[in-house]
Image: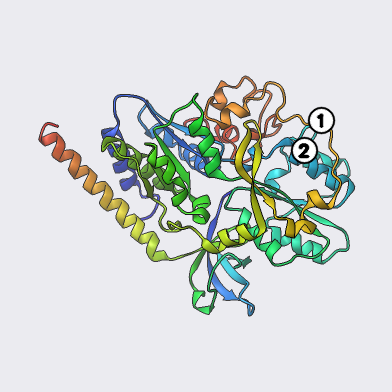
Amino acid sequence: MEFRDKVLGKKVVRLIHSLMPDRAVRIIHVCGTHEQTITKYGLRTLLPKNLELLSGPGCPVCVTPAKDIDEAIFLAKNCATLVTYGDMMRVPGSDMSLDEARSDGADVKVAYSVNDAVRMASNTKKDVVFFGIGFETTAPSNAAVLCNRPPDNFSILLSHKLVPPAMEALVGDGDVSFDGVIAPGHVSTIIGTVPYESFAERGIPVIVTGFEPLDVLFAVLMILKQMKEGQSRVENEYSRVVFANGNIKAQTLMIEAFDVADAYWRGIGEVANSGLAIKPMFSQFDAREKYDIAIGEVQDLHPGCSCGLVLTAKATPEDCKLFGKVCTPEKPYGPCMVSKEGTCHNWWKYGRYGLE
Amino acid sequence: MCLAIPGKIIKISDDKKAATVDFGGVKQEVRLDLLYGVDDFMIGNYVLVHVGYAIQLMSQQEGKETLKLFSEYADALEKELQGESEHGI
């Protein structure tokens, strides 16, 4: 048996239909990789019509504010070699993307890991700045670099975001309600399952979930079972890599290197305690301290872009007038169309219900 | 972005800070900074790797165990539901 076992998959789908109540059920996930699994394998076609699988702000590339991209472009044009993950290249800033800035002469390079950027800095006299974006899954790698004392010509433009405070903002938002949460597997590998207890205590079942189609179907089944029993607990469906306390070493490094800070989420706004800032003791490696960054007026989303509504599950990509017309993966107008994890990108590529 | 891929440790560096990891035939260097107690006993084990860093040590046993649990969960639930319909609930 494996994680794409058809017989078991069909059985789980049957059970989901048996447990489904008559009323509408809304389940939200907060991870771009889950959206990818759901659309790629057409999981929505297998589910009851009155069960909605919604997509939250789970794409770090999409929620990185235009201001931070503008800062990265300023650094690449004026101060240093700016190293970024490939996903970030085509995301529009206020005036242009990093990709367009590079065509314009800015010094931008793509790397797979922050470690590649550290190596680049060791081999050059020029300053190197790493654009540190991502959720809790990614933040520990940057913390490890700071704690290992990188070369003096290296610094980080930090733009990390934390998932539980964003979930809190969604749940606290009166406009939307959810019957259950599919929690992100790899974020949870780092933070564990404990941070979700407060949601369960308020009546929302939370299932920490892996990324195979069977994982996601099982999570839906587990939520429906809890609902039927009138319970709300945190359950860990992804126990093969997620432990209750998470990865303590990674958490310790993050505490050593970063302070928790308020953060701005693109299309959503300021969320209290939802980001990280480099601790003052590492300020020589903080690009915002090291350079006088000067940027123009920030335009977070271009007029007409519905990314903010899509990221908060208030609209689907199909509700957006620009979707698939003005805005496509070839020529993305908004950030949710750029990344492979963006909801708009996935719906354009696979369709809402997956490929027929 | 939070994509993470399992790979098999085939070598650990002398300073225990990095490993050579085999991803289905492609070998890459992976940092081990985020793991406690790194030692040669980990060679042959699988690690979950994200942006060049191992974020968790895995065991194949756990993967098999999960599938067994999935199967048992589904069987038990099916029986429970059958029982309910027989009793007219």
Residue A18, position as x, y percentages in the image: 26, 34
Q: Amino acid at mark 1?
A: Glu
Numbered disc 1: secondary structure: loop
Q: Chain of mark 2?
A: A
Q: In this view of the protein, which residue sits in the foreground, A8 or A123?
A: A123
* Residue in the image at 67% along x and 40% along y: A64
Residue that carries the numbered disc 2 in the rendered image:
A97
Q: Amino acid at mark 2?
A: Ser
Can the viewer see residue A356 in this picture? no
* Residue in the image at 22% along x and 48% along y: B76
Mark 1 vs 2, N-terminal side: 2
Q: Quadrant of the C terminus of chain B?
A: top left
Determine which quarter of the picture holds residue A213: top left
Residue A70, position as x, y percentages in the image: 79, 39
* Residue in the image at 57% along x and 53% along y: A137
In the displayed structure, would residue B20 be above or below residue A167?
Answer: below
